[in-house]
Image (tube, coloured by chain):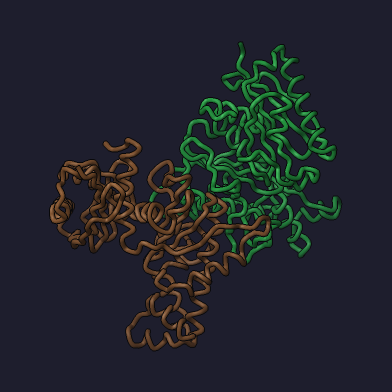
Chain colours: A brown, B green
Amino acid sequence: MAELFIGIDVGATNVKIGCFDGELKLISKKSITTDAEMGPDIVVGNITEAVKMLVTESGLSIDDVCAVGLGTPGPAKYSEGIILSSTNMPKFKNVPIRRMLSEKLGKPVVFDNDANVACWGEFVAGAGKEVNDMVFFTLGTGIGGAIVNHGELLTGCGDNATELGHIIIYPDGRRCNCGQRGCVEAYASASWTAARATEAVEAGAESSLKKVLDTKGEITCKDVYEHLARGDQLAKKITDETAKALAVLCINVLHTTEPERIVFAGGMIAAGDVLLDRIRHYFNEHIWILKKETVEICFATLGEDAGIIGAAALAKHAKEQDRLN
Amino acid sequence: MAELFIGIDVGATNVKIGCFDGELKLISKKSITTDAEMGPDIVVGNITEAVKMLVTESGLSIDDVCAVGLGTPGPAKYSEGIILSSTNMPKFKNVPIRRMLSEKLGKPVVFDNDANVACWGEFVAGAGKEVNDMVFFTLGTGIGGAIVNHGELLTGCGDNATELGHIIIYPDGRRCNCGQRGCVEAYASASWTAARATEAVEAGAESSLKKVLDTKGEITCKDVYEHLARGDQLAKKITDETAKALAVLCINVLHTTEPERIVFAGGMIAAGDVLLDRIRHYFNEHIWILKKETVEICFATLGEDAGIIGAAALAKHAKEQDRLN
């Protein structure tokens, strides 16, 4: 009998589903639209059907599935299996999604937030697979974070540890969407990187990005990196500020949980070495001289599959620790 | 047969030693001068004699000692039992203190840094005894830190986790002794609080502290709080800056390991409610609005005994986990 694990990564637009063997080798995967506006019952029903189809289309039986891992955005009460609310899925309020999915599939479901799930994927199969202690950041609209400490995801007294994008690095600085001022997210996320560029152009800074703003009505983070590659000085300045904020963030988490590796993921890492090199540069410039630090700062390697791999791997991990209910 | 645990807290000036019963009740304690300039052999010899005397003077036998806990300042390779160097004890270089003390006493020795040891004392018997997750800060010449996560001290990939005084809150700010700029320590420790007051007076700020500087040639942190109590406006401004820096630090650790309680210790907490109230005020002013935070911010309760209690408790904890060598 095969031993299968299913990984499910729920996003606002798409749900990605992967079917893995007992060694966490990907057998097959698929993506369906989330259709969050249809409400929790229909969404969970669709996911259930998609999981069953994925397994049978692979010539396997749902009976062979040991457990299912599920990652969703927060805020949620992960320990109780409940999505509390969701900016992008307004019909999901106090939804006991773990129990709903578990009942429909007849399988134990392990539930965690999307950053933890992706982090766990990179930890077991990607950029962190050789280490035991790592910190993980996702650079997207916001900045998400997760920490692996001595081989386990770090959790706190509730379900809100490792909100690393909301570490304050500039008290009284920019107002973040969370209500705080000076969060690293309010400087270095993709959307705030773009916003800083837009502000600068609107304030009259000389830049080839002005034409982008005039033509498209907006500047994206991708535009910033494209114009950086062509030598635009404003794009360089904006990128430097992003990299410096991320470097300070790296120093702060290093002095807190002392990881062996710090891994950046998310859409923004498409910027490539130009961003990574600048983060490392500012890290070296700002880190203490008391001792030489050997932490490695790198980019994630699994791309969009990190979520399904991590979710399946968390399910397997829970089984190994006899934590499946 | 009694079951005893010994707690030893090594400081640059004094070594405090406590003898505890199996329930961690203090039986007796003593303090000897460290005499660090005599070198490691003599210091370890003196500590050994003092431990033996403390036990026999209490009418007990050294045979009844299960294990010894030892806390020292860093930097050290705690996992290997070695003090690497010490600013205040220059003759202590690569000293295998755990093995030396263990051989002389004929007992297993558990070794950790002074902040971890004091934190563990507060966790098991002081300000953190009702909680499972706490963050601990010592406010002295520098700022030390320690974290208890799910009932265990948080350690990283080496021996340098929870250097929380070196979290950067003002990039490009004041130069800290560690070489970084803008560490929280470079604003909010007792010595830097005093230094900021001195700077302000020297720059011409109006304050009753001017007379202190003129008379004594220096301003201490204690002076700042005394003049604050008498209504001095500069002392208020300096205290506000200290409290704000500590509040930002609280927010940053909350978003990292999500403690249930944050405990401040060290000489500076003698300032009392005036400091604690300001820290709480700035915390509430700067914390996000995404959810209501219930973390409690409070002062330590064990005073100078935290180190010996924590060291003895760590020894007992290691015994219970079968980690004594």
Is A135 rendered above or below residue B136? below
Q: Quadrant of residue A88?
A: bottom left
Percent of width and height locating residue A240? 52, 74
Residue A88 seen in this snapshot = yes
Asked if residue B30 lies left or right of residue A64, the reply is right
Q: Quadrant of the C terminus of chain B?
A: top right
Percent of width and height locating residue A95? 23, 47
Residue displayed at 27% across by 56% down = A26
Asked if residue A184 lies left or right of residue A22, the reply is right
Q: How many marks?
A: 0
Q: Quadrant of residue A281?
A: bottom right
Residue displayed at 66% across by 28% down = B7
Residue A163 seen in this snapshot = no
Looking at this view, is B248 or B52 the one in front? B52
Asked if residue B251 lies left or right of residue A40, the reply is right
Residue displayed at 38% across by 45% down = A159
Residue displayed at 61% across by 64% down = A286
Percent of width and height locating residue B103? 71, 28
Asked if residue B154 lies left or right of residue A311, the reply is right
Percent of width and height locating residue B16? 73, 30
Q: Quadrant of the N terminus of chain B?
A: top right
Is A15 rendered above or below residue A63? below
Is A174 rendered above or below residue B214? below
